[in-house]
């Protein structure tokens, strides 16, 4: 499934849920797991100093400092390491999103795992801070591989994965997300839900669509799912088509809870523009922040 998984972490408690999934996924699929941490922003020029993301103080880059950072990482994830095995470690100075993407491309990573945010209340607890939500957005925007985003402990995950939910708006970008969801479901042998939410909030002159109109749109959406996605699944028949009406992110989250889904797969963005220029879609962002299960953001077909 995944030959190499990159877990991008600042090792704060905000990353604990993502860490658990990263270690467990690597064990299940016998993947190489790399714990990756960017510890400081380098000074300009040829200076040997970095500005610590936590304290704002300057630190001298050297073998001792790098080794100390790695030891901090080992200490942070000691329990998971003892349970699931020793990962590889990589630490360096730089801009987090830039270095994560650079490493993922260079090492041909198959999946990036990271938390939705890294904010925590106890700023004195650990030294690893500073990768904010914008890092996740920039990585999801430009990554050539799927990005698995975890915002909270997964209550429905049962040894990864049993029920995959693919959320689509029929945009061009959704096709890469579909291919990822389908290939995962096919290889694992789990159920795949093909989900679409009709946005009935779109009204004319303050008048919303009638029930008959909504039912017709539901039928058309089901037909479009069959022609666009089901037609590509060959003999795979462990799927279900689901079309709900309402605010897209609300309905998707409601459906995921009702179906006990343990992975939501969506396109990184939905607008018909170049993926390098697209920001994280508002629907995806709301799903990421509110979902009780991991969310895979996919924006390219490069490494599916």
Image (cartoon, helix red, strand yellow):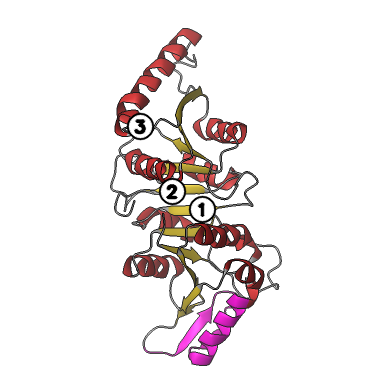
**Counting residues from the N terminus, which is met first, the one under dot 2 or under dot 1?**
1
Circle 1 sits in a helix, a strand or a loop, which is it?
strand
Range of the magenta residues? 46-74
Q: Which mark is residue 149?
A: 1
Towards the viewer: 9 or 226? 226
Front-lying residue, 40 or 221: 221
Q: At 52% from the left edge and 29% from the top edge, which residue is drawn?
A: 247
Q: Which of disc 1 and disc 3 is earlier in sequence? A: 1
Quadrant placement of the N terminus: bottom left
Quarter-of-image position of residue 293: top right
> From where the camera sits, is residue 59 visible?
no
Mark 2 touches mark 3? (CB < 8 Å): no
Q: Is residue 265 above or below residue 147?
A: above
- Label 2, label 3: how many angstroms apart (C-alpha)? 15 Å
Q: Secondary structure at mark 2?
A: strand
Is 104 inside the magenta-drawn segment?
no
- Residue 145 location (% of width, % of height): 37, 56
């Amino acid at each position: 499934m995944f030959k190499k998984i990159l877990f991008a972490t600042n090792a704060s408690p905000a990353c604990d849920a993502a860490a658990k999934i990263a270690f467990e996924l690597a064990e299940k699929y016998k993947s190489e797991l790399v714990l990756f941490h960017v510890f400081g922003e380098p000074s300009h020029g040829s200076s040997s100093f970095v500005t610590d993301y936590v304290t704002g103080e300057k630190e001298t880059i050297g073998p001792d400092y790098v080794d100390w950072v790695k030891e901090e990482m080992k200490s942070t994830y000691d329990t998971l390491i003892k349970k699931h095995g020793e990962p590889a470690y990589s630490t360096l100075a730089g801009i987090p999103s830039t270095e994560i993407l650079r490493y993922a491309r260079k090492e041909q990573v198959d999946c990036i795992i990271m938390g939705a945010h890294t904010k925590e209340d106890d700023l004195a607890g650990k030294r690893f801070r500073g990768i904010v939500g914008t890092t996740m957005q920039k990585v999801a925007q430009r990554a050539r591989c799927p990005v698995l985003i975890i915002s909270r402990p997964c209550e429905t995950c049962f040894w990864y994965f049993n029920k995959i939910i693919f959320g689509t708006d029929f945009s061009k970008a959704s096709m890469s997300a579909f291919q990822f969801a389908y290939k995962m479901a096919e290889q694992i042998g789990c159920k795949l839900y093909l989900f679409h939410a009709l946005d009935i909030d779109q009204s004319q002159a303050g008048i919303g669509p009638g029930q008959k109109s909504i039912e017709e749109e539901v039928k058309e959406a089901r037909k479009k799912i069959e022609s666009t996605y089901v037609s590509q699944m060959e003999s795979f028949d462990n799927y279900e088509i689901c079309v709900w009406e309402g605010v897209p992110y609300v309905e998707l989250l409601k459906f995921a809870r009702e179906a006990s889904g343990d992975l939501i797969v969506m396109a990184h963005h939905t607008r018909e523009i170049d993926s390098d220029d697209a920001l994280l879609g508002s629907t995806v962002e709301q799903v990421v922040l509110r979902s009780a299960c991991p969310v895979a953001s996919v924006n390219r077909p490069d490494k599916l």
